[in-house]
Each structure stands twice: as structure tokens, then as C-alpha cells.
Image (cartoon, rainbow, N blue to C red):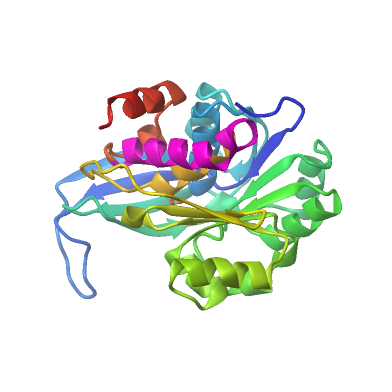
Amino acid sequence: MTEKNIKFLNFGSLNTDMVYTVDHTVRPGETTASSKLEYFCGGKGLNQSIALSRAGARIFHAGCVGSDGDRLIEQLERNGIDVHLVKKSDMPSGHAIIQVDKNGQNSILLFGGANKQISPEHIAAVLSDFKAGDRLFLQNEINNVDKIISAASEKKMDIVFNPSPFGEEIQKFPLDKVSWFVVNETEAQELTGETVPEKILSAFSAKYPSAKVLLTLGGDGAYCKADGKTYFHDIFDVPVVDTTAAGDTFLGFFFATLDSRGVEEALKYASAASAVAVSRKGASSSIPTVEETEKFLENYN
Ligand code: RIB
């Protein structure tokens, strides 16, 4: 679905997700039992690469895993993703401890591990394979994101930044070089101080005039502001099993569809794919293919 001469690079995290099924998220000071433990391949980086690929994009993934990371690399390869820019380090791979409660809502504790071993040399080597106009996807689960933004901007790459998980350090990143912000309501509020969608979008335009914004609001749908126009798509209402990786699925399907079919279709496919993802358990394993997404759209009434 993407334009043929533009390359997509995702420089991002790879995690093992340990998913515990619980009645409710553990409260401070409380000890509680889980009813199930499952292991999945995850990490916002890995999930977004898989979503992009399952939506039809050709994608290169760059990142870092430990000697225990073969399963994560294999998961990317099985999904048709080029992994020659994934390095191995002495640190163990990143992992996430995820509690999923009876309503399908999650809470996530991250250990960065090898995701935090991205060196300036690795960044230079990765970016040397890409040119002006190629699209770079970044989240905030690896180190040196600010340096990657600066180096990619010098090459005039199109930078898509999903500031997740949000941390104070992000305020100091060279965000004026970002082409697309992909934010949920919390991240949007951190960056703009606003809580109402229309005000968030206006605040982004005032602060970063050349940037486009994709604002995802969970059950309240998603907005996109691009080239002075505002678009909205409501959710496809489905029973929620597990919201993990719903945002990653949305991002992947949106950008894999955008260049060939425009913003409105991209929002529709992204909303449909994330509806399928929340109806399934796990992170990358919950992400549908483009065929499954089209089937969902055909059958939804
Ligand atoms: O967005 C979901 C992801 O966040 C999980 O797969 C987990 O690894 C964390 O990075």
C-alpha cells in the first residue's frame, strides 16, 4: 500500500511481554494473585513494525536485543520485516510486566534492557542506509531518541514520533523537527497543556506549525490534522478483551494506508484494525492482517 521508492524505517524497542490476567490492577501495598501468565512478543517498536508490515508496508526495523532476543528477531522476520539493522548487546532484552484486568484495560511496567543500548555509531550506521523523504518511526522506549531525531532531520527524513511512554526528557527533544506527532490524550496534554481535542490540535499547530498530528482517544475515536484540515473517525464498537498494542496497530495501519489512499481511508483502516486488535489477547499477536481488517469492515454493520 506504500509508495515504492520511499523506505520505511522503525528505530524502536523489542520486548518480551509477560501478561498476567488479573481481576483488577494491583494497588499500592496490595498482594494479589493472577489467574494466568502468558508470554508474547511486544514493545512499541516491534508492535508498530508488525502493524505496518501486516498492513502492507515494507519495513526495516532497527534496534537492540540481548543474547536472549532471538525470539523477538524471529517474530519480526516471520512478519516480513528486514532485521539486518537490529544489533545484539550484552544486556538482557527489554521486557514488560503487563496486568490485564477483567475489563481488558492494562497497566505496564517496563524494563528497557538492551533497548537502552543504542549508540551514536549504531545510529549513524542505520541512517546511512536511508535518504531524504524516507519515513522514520520513533517511540520513546529506546535511548538517544533526541539524537536520532536530529540526525534524521539533517538527512531530511520524514519523522513520525509517538512520544510513548511519556517522560519529562521529551520536552527537551528537538520536536520542531518532527513531521508527524502520534499522541493519545495524556501525551497530547503533556505537550500542549490542553485537554479538549480541538484545542489540542490548535495548540499543536501553533507550537509546531509544519507538523501533522494524529490524536487517538481510545473509545472516543481519533482525529488527524494535516495540511490545515481536520479529520475525525469514530471507533468501531467491539467487545474489549485486551487493549495492549491497540495504539501501535492504529499507527501502523494509518501510515501503511496514508500515501496511497489518503487520510480518510487511513483513519478508517486504522480504526478497524485496532478494533480487531482489542478483541484479541496479547501485543503483536493481536494485530490483524490487511485481509482480516478488510473482512472486519465488510462484516461490521
Ligand atoms: O504498546 C504496547 C507495548 O508497550 C507492549 O507490547 C509493551 O512491551 C510496551 O512496550
**Left or right of 222 on screen, residue 300:** left
On screen, 139 above or below 82?
below
Quarter occupied by the N terminus: top right
Q: Where is residue 4 in the image (x, y as percent from the top left)?
A: 72, 25
- Residue 110 position by quadrant: bottom left
Check if residue 284 falls in the magenta segment: no
Check if residue 269 falls in the magenta segment: yes
Which one is nearer the viewer's eye here, 105 or 133?
Answer: 133
Q: Is the magenta stretch mostly helix, strand or loop?
A: helix
Q: Position of residue 197 (x, y in %)?
A: 46, 66
Q: In the image as oriented, which residue stretches furthest toward the bottom?
A: 193
**Left or right of 209 on screen, residue 109:** left
**Left or right of 288 on screen, residue 33:** left
Give the magenta-colored segment's residue range: 257-278
Q: Where is residue 141 in the image (x, y as percent from the top left)?
A: 55, 56
Point 67% across, 54% down: residue = 227
On screen, 114 above or below 211?
above
On screen, 108 above or below 265?
below
Please say whether residue 144 is visible from this viewpoint.
no
Please say whether residue 220 is visible from this viewpoint.
yes
Point 51% across, 29% down: residue = 55
Point 43% across, 26% down: residue = 289
Which one is nearer the viewer's eye here, 293 or 80?
Answer: 293
On screen, 145 above or below 84?
below
Quarter occupied by the C terminus: top left
Which one is nearer the viewer's eye here, 268 or 79?
Answer: 268
**Left or right of 53 on screen, residue 146:** right
